[in-house]
Image (spheres, rainbow, N blue to C red):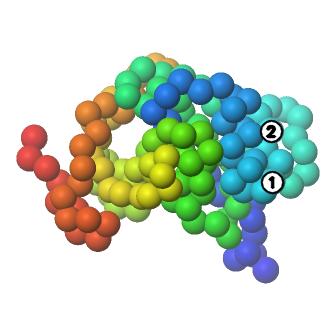
């Protein structure tokens, strides 16, 4: 069944601390119960690929996950990884608002936030994270 293909996902997260690639891979592997390997020419069948790199901002570790399982909600996976790493993880939400994100907290909870994002040569830097008013369903864009 093509709609059950577990290899098509792409997740782009940022963590609120400077983390090593090894630590991120271990947390992701534990959360997904799958092998996680670095992005590169050699892959392992069925493995999730993960690229970890660093930028500035309040969320300096960028985590790009390739071949993520589509059978697991991205926010659920981010929450499990945030708990394992004991850091906040920010990920895009499902709206077209470029300032709105889902925040996975180290206690496993999820919430909506706004953040300022600046594209740099190293990747996107996210700063000034603030709560989203209106809860998980009705977030208003804050006044500038």
Which residue is pictured at 50% across the width and 38% down the height?
A: 87
Judged left or right of residue 141, residue 122 is right
Q: Quadrant of the C terminus?
A: top left
Q: Which residue is rendered at x = 91% and y = 51% of the image?
A: 45
Residue 84 showing in the rendered view: yes
- Residue 44 placement: quadrant: top right
Check the image and report above or below for 1 versus 120: below
Label annotation for residue 120: none
Point 78% across, 56% down: residue:
33
**Image-quadrant location for residue 57:** top left
- Foreground residue among 83 and 143: 83
Q: Callout 1 environment at 10 Å: few (<14), some (14 to 19), or many (20+)? A: some
User: Where the N terminus falls, by quadrant?
Assistant: bottom right
Which residue is label 1 attached to? 34
Q: Secondary structure at mark 1?
A: loop
Residue 105 location, x and y as percent?
A: 45, 49
Would you say residue 119 is visible in this rendering?
Answer: no
Residue at image mark 2? 37
Point out the residue furthest to the front here: 107
Q: Quadrant of residue 71?
A: bottom right
Which residue shows up at 48% across the image and 22% down it?
55
Q: Nearer the viewer, mark 1 or mark 2?
A: 1
Q: Position of residue 30 (x, y in %)?
A: 74, 50
Residue 21: percent from the left, percent from the top? 69, 28
Give the structural element (helix, strand or loop) at label 2.
strand
* Above or below 130: residue 52: above
What percent of the width, then of the height, locates residue 130?
24, 43
Up-down: is 54 above or below 117? Answer: above
Q: CA distance from mark 1 to mark 2?
A: 10 Å
């Amino acid at each position: 069944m093509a709609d059950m293909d577990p290899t098509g996902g792409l997740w782009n997260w940022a963590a609120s601390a400077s983390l090593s690639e090894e630590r991120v891979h271990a947390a992701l592997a534990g959360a997904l119960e799958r092998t996680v390997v670095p992005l590169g020419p050699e892959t392992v069948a069925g493995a999730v690929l993960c690229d970890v790199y660093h930028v500035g901002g309040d969320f300096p570790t960028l985590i790009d996950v390739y071949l993520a399982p589509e059978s697991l909600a991205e926010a659920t996976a981010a929450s499990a990884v945030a708990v394992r790493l004991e850091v906040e993880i920010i990920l895009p939400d499902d709206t077209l608002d470029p300032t709105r994100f889902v925040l996975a907290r180290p206690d496993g909870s999820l919430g909506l936030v706004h953040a300022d994002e600046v594209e740099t040569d190293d990747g996107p830097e996210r700063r000034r994270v603030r709560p989203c008013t209106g809860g998980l369903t009705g977030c208003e864009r804050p006044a500038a």
